Image: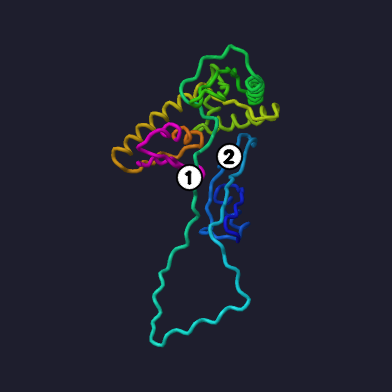
Amino acid sequence: MNSGRSIEATGEDVEKAIAAGLAELGAGPGDVIVEVLEEPSRGMFGLGSRPARVRLQLLVVSAPPSEEPAPPAPAPVEAKPAPQETKAAPKPVVEPDDDEDDDVFLGDVAEEYDGPLDEDAEVGKVVLTELLEKMSVRAMVIVRRAQSGEDGENVPWLLDVAGNNDLSMLIGRRGETLASLQYVTRLITSRELQRRANIIVDVSGYKARRTSKLNELAQRMANQAAEQQRTVTLEPMPPYERRIVHLALRNREDVTTRSVGEGSGRKVTIVPK
């Protein structure tokens, strides 16, 4: 093995992706640093599914066996062999990520946008409307302008699905169906534009409400971690929600955040500095 060599591997889940990478490197779990690049997604209706993706970097160099091994040195006559401490095989080191998911918007969302739309909003609205029709969902797509970042640049378009009927089926458990709907909409729109589409898909303002609640939760738990000087672990969250927590606390000087765990059990920990 060459020291510092790095590869990427994919698998059905994070564990299988790591196993595939170890097999390709011919390395053991203790020989690598594992960085989770992308968690698996089941997609919706068989569309948009993607495997887990990890990066493995070698830590150690295995010395090649010599052709003629040197004979062992004779032990002293009266020397007793020193007891050797047995150690468990080290587990792979999984570096905490920043849960980079660029569909996060902060703050309030503007009212329905009645100005001129650029290609991203126009094409995205057509694609999302056609998807809803194929799903037999009676709803309309309202274009809004999301607020994102601190400098106001690269502000995404928000395509909000609204209607008189119950649209909770488009949100799903912990927003999983909504995440799949956004992935497919953005994928098709990006292919039509031949570039990445700067759009976000929401349903009845779900993401805006959820963002507000997560911001409040993050600040409350951060205060608790700082006051009690102990690490606070939040419940498992999807990447989108974990990133909201990271962003909500990134400017605090008394705590830091990192993600731990794998797959659907991945969660944010708030650690006092």
Q: Among all residues in the image, which is located at the extreme left? A: 228
Q: Quadrant of residue 167?
A: top right
Q: Judge whether residue 100 is colored magenta.
A: no
Q: Quick check: 175 left or right of 222?
A: right
Q: Residue at x 54, y 82 (%)?
A: 71
**Split into 4 quadrants, where in the image is the N terminus?**
bottom right
Name the quadrant containing residue 4: bottom right
Kind of residue at badge 1: Pro
Residue 225 image offset from top left, x and y in percent: 33, 39
Q: Disc 2 marks which residue?
A: 41
Query: Is 257 a magenta residue?
Result: yes
* Nearer to the camera, 254 or 89: 254
Residue ID for mark 1: 96
Alpha-carbon span between mark 2 and mark 1: 19 Å
First along the sequence among labels 2 and 1: 2
**Residue 160: x %, y % from top left:** 55, 21
Q: State which region is magenta.
A: 246-273
Which of these two is toward me, 51 or 138?
51
Q: Position of residue 135 (x, y in %)?
A: 63, 26
- Circle 2 residues within 10 Å: few <14, some 14–19, many ≥20: some
Residue found at the very far top of the displayed protein: 114
Which residue is the extreme one toward the bottom? 77
- Nearer-the-camera pick, 180 or 10: 10
Secondary structure category for the residue under label 1: loop
